[in-house]
Every structure is written in structure tokens, then in C-alpha cells.
């Protein structure tokens, strides 16, 4: 597989936290984005879904971005996040192969 040990370590670190897993589940839901996207959420939507303050959500989103589990795009004043489904699926296959 294409992933190196540091990438797998970042992936595992990112999903080890229950809050980040809640964020990833929220990002998987269809609809509900306040900027009318079918998939993904803006930062304010994530704050509302996980019931955390903006600085805390930003901290978790940085970790998820560093692990490449989410992709972020700026649209006007909004920061819009989507799951990186391809990387998640590839890493899960790699992890299964190693266990």
C-alpha cells in the first residue's frame, strides 16, 4: 500500500479521540450544510453538531486535516470540510491487512 508508518500513526491518532470520530460521522451525513452543499459541513455546522466551542473544533479539525482525513476549502467567509473517503477506505484496508 501507499501509506507509510507515519501516515498510519497520524490516522490512528486522529481517530483515537471520540470527538474527532463524532466529527467524522457528522461529515458523513448527507444534507444539513448551511452553505447548501450536499456533502460536508462548514465549521459553524460542525460546532453545532458536536456542541463544542469554535477554538476546540478548530483544534480537532487541524488534527483531522494533518492526517488527511478531511479536506478543507474556503468559500467566501466559510470554511467547508469534507471527508477524504478514498484515504479512509485505503487506510482501513491497509490496517486490516496488518492485523
Image: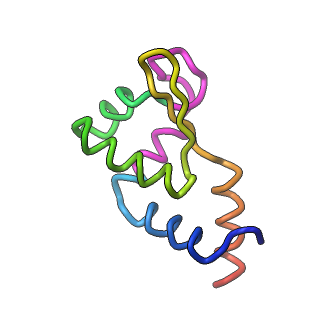
List the single residue furthest toward the right.
1
Q: Where is residue 54 shown, x and y percent of the image?
A: 26, 35
Q: Where is residue 90 shown, x and y percent of the image?
A: 71, 62
Secondary structure predominantly adopted by residues drawn in magenta: loop
In the image, what residue occupies the spot 59% across and 68% down?
7
Magenta stretch: includes residue 39: yes
Closest to the observer, 8 or 98: 8
Which quadrant of the view contains residue 87?
bottom right
Left or right of 49? Residue 1 is right
Magenta stretch: includes residue 70: no
In the displayed structure, would residue 80 be above or below residue 22?
A: above
Left or right of 15? Residue 90 is right
Q: Which residues are magenta?
A: 22-40
Quarter occupied by the C terminus:
bottom right
List the single residue furthest toward the left.
53
In the image, what residue occupies the spot 44% across and 21% down?
78
In the displayed structure, would residue 96 be above or below residue 61?
A: below
Q: Where is residue 82 shown, x and y percent of the image?
A: 56, 37
In the displayed structure, would residue 3 be above or below residue 50?
A: below
Which quadrant of the view contains residue 77?
top left
Q: Where is residue 49 shown, x and y percent of the image?
A: 34, 34
In the image, what residue occupies the spot 60% across and 77% down?
5
Quarter occupied by the N terminus:
bottom right
Amino acid at each position: 500500500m501507499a501509506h507509510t508508518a507515519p501516515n498510519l500513526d497520524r490516522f490512528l491518532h486522529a481517530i483515537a479521540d471520540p470527538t474527532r470520530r463524532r466529527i467524522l460521522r457528522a461529515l458523513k451525513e448527507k444534507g444539513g450544510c448551511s452553505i447548501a452543499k450536499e456533502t460536508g459541513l462548514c465549521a459553524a455546522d460542525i460546532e453545532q453538531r458536536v456542541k463544542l466551542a469554535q477554538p476546540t473544533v478548530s483544534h480537532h479539525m487541524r488534527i483531522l486535516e494533518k492526517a488527511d482525513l478531511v479536506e478543507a476549502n474556503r468559500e467566501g467567509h466559510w470554511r467547508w470540510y469534507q471527508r477524504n473517503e478514498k484515504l479512509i477506505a485505503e487506510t482501513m484496508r491497509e490496517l486490516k491487512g496488518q492485523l
